[in-house]
């Protein structure tokens, strides 16, 4: 089982892509390596300078709502963020995570269990099918069988995920193409799947 | 069992007899739109090993987000896109000045009933005004669509919104849209296909209708659909670029949620800083000082919007210390507004006019606020920093209220309504 270890950054509901990666940079900052400088600029001024590889973002409902801009995922991926756990994700943001091979996990109970005070600076572990934060454990339900069967060799375009994976050392199972088959996205509470 | 619009259209396009929520299907969009982000998409496309766009006829590219270019960097971005369009033979290209992608897609007869529009822009659900399935996607996904001509989609559950009755005088489709977002919340339609039903909707003009799918993005909708009728067909008569076949939901379709609103009960609404679902009646925020008023965007930059603003501004002046920026959503709207005398009214009132496009909506140019300033706008987003300045506030309202507020120098109800 693969695990991601890191400190937790805890945020609230409906965090939009304008505060994750401001729109004024969308056509002036084009190099992914430059993007971490602006990550969460209008949400949390500490983040860009303090984030460490493997840190985990824990958020409330509807993380990544608003604009479709992919830099809102890329800037976190390039910052070394290991995973985002949220009560729910905005749909385009979720798809962008998938294509960037940035693990985006939905778990209401995990998010509610991680309080900011106790989670600040704490270490969380995040596995392929289970994760533990302090005393909380949760199993992710695999995706519907149908979506597994869907996969055709050419349908999963060899995305940048591979390049990202090599760079960030993301486990194989989090490869964009195989992410659904790893069963990462659905929690027991969240009947509605993403995308 | 009956099917919703989303289930039906995704089945049709995927070559299946039916689909159900949660199913993953693969479809070829009838139109794929991108804008100033096309240069970034090109970079991903090339990184993926893409050489030739599979179906150049499928793609529509618009330069609207920072148009005309405010800096050398933006200009370089546009240059790369123009070259790509030429090299690849992209069939539908609209250079700076033509207008905002969602509006121009409709004007050009490229968003058609019963079709699928995928766009690397979150307001792509806008195309639902024509009875199309419009959904936003990311840049990497658009690069994939360029390469493969298709994409996977999850069949969404559906939310039926029914609106009955007639709106009171001075209450617009924008107020209805803000009210619904306020009631349902920023994730009220997350992953859902929204269907707007009811006589209130069908009695709206096309321009009024467009506000609803446009703002549906602000409650997380995957797509947002209005039933295409005579109003749509008439509009398309001289514009449609292809023959089309409307798709309608079955009367016994199953919806995951149903909500109903009574039009008579509504009043002018304002979305307050810093979220679109922070909606309050206008009366509660009246008197708030405004430094800048902005009329335009894909939400409310059409001819009827400019007409209602001009009605407020006729014979009046923008308040001293307040700026009014007017940006028609497209060159077609600009021309019609000029012919109708609205542009003259704006200039006489002391407003400033800018070329068609997104303007300052997402903080690129043409009216970025200073720190501490307050903007009232007809746009669809008021997130912190949205217009380029973190320490500033954005209120969202209908065009008449924005114009009246510009005159008053503070948030104010529209005057002389009849």
Image: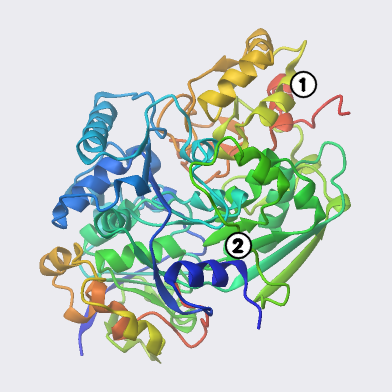
The residue at 87%/43% (across/down) is: B168
Answer left or right for B342 relative to A129.
right
Q: Quadrant of residue B362?
A: top left
The residue at 73%/17% (across/down) is: B313
Q: Quadrant of the N terminus of chain A?
A: bottom left
Read off the residue under disc 1.
Answer: B311
Query: Label 1: few (<14), some or many (≥20) within 10 Å?
Result: many
Are discs 2 and 1 located on one and the same chain? yes
Answer left or right for B277 relative to A34.
right
Towards the viewer: B402 or B260: B260
Q: Quadrant of the C terminus of chain A?
A: bottom left
Which residue sits furthest top?
B348
Answer left or right for A102 relative to B1.
left
Compared with A53, B62 (above or below) is above
Compared with B17, B362 (above or below) is above
Q: Position of residue B246 (x, y in %)?
A: 60, 57
Towards the viewer: B37 or A3: B37
SS under mark 2: loop
Compared with B142, B4 (above or below) is below
Q: Quadrant of residue B378?
A: top right
Q: How is the image coloured?
A: rainbow
Compared with A130, B142 (above or below) is above
Q: Quadrant of residue B347?
A: top right
Mark 2, chain letter? B
Instruction: Say which of marks 2 and 1 sits in front.
Output: 2
Read off the residue under disc 2.
Answer: B247
Mark 1, chain letter? B
Q: What is the CA distance from the residue labelled 2 to the residue labelled 1?
A: 38 Å
Q: Position of residue B252 (x, y in %)?
A: 72, 77
The residue at 15%/69% (across/down) is: A165
């Amino acid at each position: 089982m693969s695990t991601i270890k890191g400190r937790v950054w805890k945020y609230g509901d409906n965090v939009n892509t304008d505060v994750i990666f401001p729109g004024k940079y969308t056509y002036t900052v084009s190099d992914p390596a430059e993007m971490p400088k602006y990550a969460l600029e209008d949400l949390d001024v500490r983040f860009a300078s303090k984030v460490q590889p493997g840190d985990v973002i824990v958020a409330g409902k509807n993380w990544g709502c608003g604009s479709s801009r992919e830099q809102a995922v890329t800037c976190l991926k390039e910052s070394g963020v290991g995973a985002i756990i949220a009560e729910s994700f905005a749909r385009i943001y979720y798809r962008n995570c998938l294509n960037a091979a940035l693990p985006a996990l939905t778990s209401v109970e995990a998010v509610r269990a991680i309080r900011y005070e106790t989670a600040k600076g704490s270490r969380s572990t995040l596995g392929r099918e289970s994760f533990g934060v302090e005393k909380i454990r949760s199993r992710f339900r695999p995706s519907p069988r149908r979506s597994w069967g869907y996969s055709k060799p050419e349908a999963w375009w060899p995305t940048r995920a591979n390049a990202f994976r090599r760079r960030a050392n993301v486990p194989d199972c989090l490869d964009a193409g195989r992410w659904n088959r790893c069963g990462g996205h659905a929690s027991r509470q969240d009947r509605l799947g993403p995308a | 069992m009956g099917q919703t619009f989303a289930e039906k259209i995704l089945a049709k396009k995927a070559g299946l007899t039916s689909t159900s929520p949660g199913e993953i299907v693969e479809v070829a969009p009838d139109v794929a739109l991108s804008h100033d982000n096309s240069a970034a998409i090109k970079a991903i496309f090339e990184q993926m090993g893409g050489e030739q766009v599979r179906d150049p006829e499928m793609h529509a590219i618009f330069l609207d987000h920072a148009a005309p270019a405010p800096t050398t960097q933006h200009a370089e971005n546009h240059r790369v896109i123009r070259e790509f369009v030429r090299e690849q033979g992209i069939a539908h290209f609209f250079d700076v000045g033509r207008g905002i992608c969602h509006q121009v897609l409709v004007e050009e007869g490229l968003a058609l009933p019963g079709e699928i529009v995928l766009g690397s822009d979150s307001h792509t659900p806008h195309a639902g005004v024509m009875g199309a399935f419009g959904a936003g996607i990311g840049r990497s996904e658009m690069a994939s669509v360029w390469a493969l001509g298709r994409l996977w989609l999850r069949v969404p559950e559906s939310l039926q919104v029914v609106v009955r009755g007639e709106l009171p005088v001075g209450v617009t489709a924008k107020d209805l849209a803000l009210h619904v977002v306020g009631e349902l919340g920023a994730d009220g339609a997350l992953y859902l296909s929204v269907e707007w039903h009811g006589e209130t909707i069908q009695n709206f003009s096309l321009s009024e209708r467009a506000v609803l799918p446009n703002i549906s993005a602000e409650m997380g909708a995957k797509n947002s659909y209005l039933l295409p009728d005579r109003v749509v067909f008439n509009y398309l008569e001289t514009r449609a670029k292809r023959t089309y076949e409307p798709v309608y939901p079955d009367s016994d379709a199953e919806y995951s949620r149903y909500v109903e609103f009574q039009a008579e009960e509504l009043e002018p609404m304002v979305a307050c800083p810093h979220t679109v679902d922070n909606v309050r009646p206008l009366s509660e925020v009246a008197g708030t000082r405004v430094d800048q008023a902005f009329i335009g965007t894909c939400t409310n930059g059409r001819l009827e919007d400019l007409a209602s603003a001009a009605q407020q501004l006729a014979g009046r002046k923008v308040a001293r210390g307040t700026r009014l920026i007017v940006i028609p959503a497209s060159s077609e709207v600009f021309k019609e507004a000029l012919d109708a005398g609205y542009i003259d009214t704006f200039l006489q009132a002391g407003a400033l006019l800018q070329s068609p496009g997104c303007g300052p909506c997402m903080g690129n140019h043409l009216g970025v606020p200073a720190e501490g300033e307050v903007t009232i706008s007809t746009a669809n987003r008021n997130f912190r920093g949205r217009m380029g300045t973190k320490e500033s506030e954005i209120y969202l309202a209908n065009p008449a209220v924005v114009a009246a507020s510009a005159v008053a120098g503070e948030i104010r109800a529209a005057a002389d309504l009849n």
